[in-house]
Image (spheres, rainbow, N blue to C red):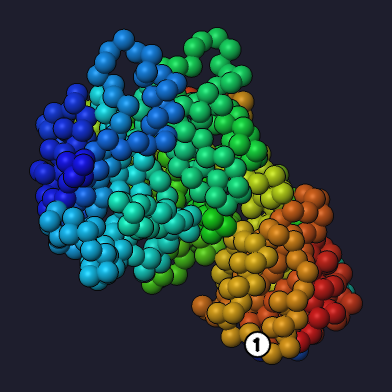
Amino acid sequence: MQNNLEEAIARVKQYSESRDAKQSLESYQNHLNETTKKINEEQQPSVEDMRHKFTV
Amino acid sequence: MSDDLDVCHYSIEHLRDIISKSSSCNTVEKISNKTHDNYLQSYLNDQGVKTLIVEQDYIDHDYLEDYASYYVRCFSEEYKRKCTRIHFFKNDFSKKEFLECLTSFNENKEFHNNLKENYLGFTVIKPLPLSIIGRTCLATYPEIDGRTFPVIREYKVNICGIELSVKSLAFQEQDSTVAACATSALWSLFQGTGKKFQHKILSPIEITKAATDKLPYNTRTLPNDGLSFEMIAQGIRHVGLEPFAIMVDEFWLKANLYAYLRGKIPVLLGIRLYDIDPPKPESMGLHAIAVTGFKLNTHNDSQKYEGKMNLRSSRIDKIYAHDDQVGPFARMDFDDPIEVNGVNKAQPTLTTSWKNTRKKENVVRAVPLMITIPLYEKIRIPFNSIYLKTKNLNDFLNYIFVDDVIVDGVFTDKLQIEWDIYLTTNNEYKSALYESDINGEYFKEILLSNMPRYLWCSTAYIEGEKIFDLLFDATDVKNGSCFIIAVSYNNDSFNDICEICKEPDTIKIAKDFGVDYIANWFKNNKI
């Protein structure tokens, strides 16, 4: 992956020890969970949506 | 006998004349005012049609069903039982030459072969007032420059014992008595799913009756004035499939259309038509179409949508749809959003070939609202689930391979992997692998591996190069991981992921991203 495997391994180790990294990841996860919920809600058609007649 | 069959040179005037004579209530003027006339004229000219074969007294199964259920019991005697079928050919020949070929086959083998090679399909003309375009199977435009029609199939045609065939998906105009737009769209959908999932292909009136079997409670359903998505869902269940309905914006429309069409499943799209000629767009009503193809922009980078993953489907700049008021494979381009009454944000639009009430062209736009996908019951995992699983992996790979991708909880996609997510089958996936560069023992291992019948495939591309496929079980339970295997196309990048996943800390991070099951697989599967 872009020839930076060693850097990536070092980064992973650093993240596991870093409190900042953990906090950052937590806030990201919260954001992700909200996004997932929003996607599912927005895509769910309402009963009213399902009852519109396509007539043209 | 030979009077039932005519051969003539093509011109639009001649075609209008034939159509007019085949449907006694329609004058040539009425026919030339229909949108289908514009469509046919441009299609037949583009394809270089030279000759028509006209079969009088043709018996069409679908029309016969409609006739038996409705028209035969009308007082008027104008509604005839038999139709006219018109065949289109790219080569020039006369009636004399065609009839000669019937008397001496062996001496005219070349003529036969030419007929087969130059055949472009047919249209059935129904003997009805107004709605005259019956079952129509026309060859598509060539699949080049990113243009794709994944749902077409072979239709066999027989004229005087001569077997011809055309690759298409059947289309017909709404009858407006036994079938409205949604029925015509469903009918086209079933033409594809009927072959793929082996269910009965219903005629328009059978679809209307099935869809309105339980709904509406309060009024009659024939003559039919349209179907709701609730009724459409009922019609889909009637043939043993499961309807999957979702609301869509531009991003999700492109993503879902691409994913399911590539799985050879046509999609029903509900749109609202707007006349944009007045200063404020005016609604013309709700309309349903069957989406049958798309065109990917293969020259530029894919379009970016804020907060969304980089998908190959975002390259779609046109879709092709069976719009019963326009024609088969009618082109619709993604266009600028418009402001409409009652909605806060600008709505994405598609161009249409509709005319507004003042017969003006290029001023009617379609705003996509929702889609329904007719699915075989074993295809249980929806596109969304695979999108989210792939997005989690995409974010995880960014996080471990690039610095500072999450700042203040906001994720920035720095790897810019382009993901190609689509539905496929075990057999189709393995057959397609023969076209790839994979070979040797690894190739054999994948071909011999046990897989479910339906698969979701997420392919990762970096700077246009295919890196790996992730295969998911489309028949699994929704809360399961669904993940089966990853297939490598670039062993260096693939092995980098395998290597980093051997670090215990990586697996911990993967768990935070909800992709530890994929990371664990990579940990144990270096090539």
Q: To which quarter of the image does residue B409 belong?
A: bottom right
Q: Looking at the image, which residue is at 45% across and 70% down? A: B301
Quadrant showing the N terminus of chain B: top left
- Residue B226 placement, left or right of B277: right
List x then y, in percent, for residue B16: 15, 39
Q: Mark 1 packing: few (<14 Cα in 10 Å), some, or many (20+)?
A: few
Establish if B82 lies above or below A10. Answer: above
Query: Chain letter of disc 1?
Result: B
Residue type, label 1:
Asn
List x then y, in percent, for residue B42: 20, 51
- Residue A43 placement, left or right of B89: right
List x then y, in percent, for residue B263: 57, 57
Q: Looking at the image, which residue is at 65% across and 87% down? A: B439
Q: To which quarter of the image does residue B437 belong?
A: bottom right
List x then y, in percent, for residue B228: 52, 26
Which of these two is toward me, B318 or B41?
A: B41
Could one spot residue A20 in this view of the protein? no
Q: To which quarter of the image does residue B395 belong?
A: bottom right
Establish if B415 lies above or below B59. Answer: below
In the structure shown, which secondary structural element does the residue marked by tag 1 occupy? Answer: loop
- Residue B449 placement, left or right of B260: right
Quadrant showing the C terminus of chain B: bottom right
Could one spot residue A33 in this view of the protein? yes
Establish if B391 lies above or below B11. Answer: below
Which of these two is toward me, A49 or B308?
A: A49
Q: Which residue is mark 1?
A: B439
Which of these two is toward me, B246 or A6?
A: B246
Q: Looking at the image, which residue is at 42% across and 34% down? A: B62
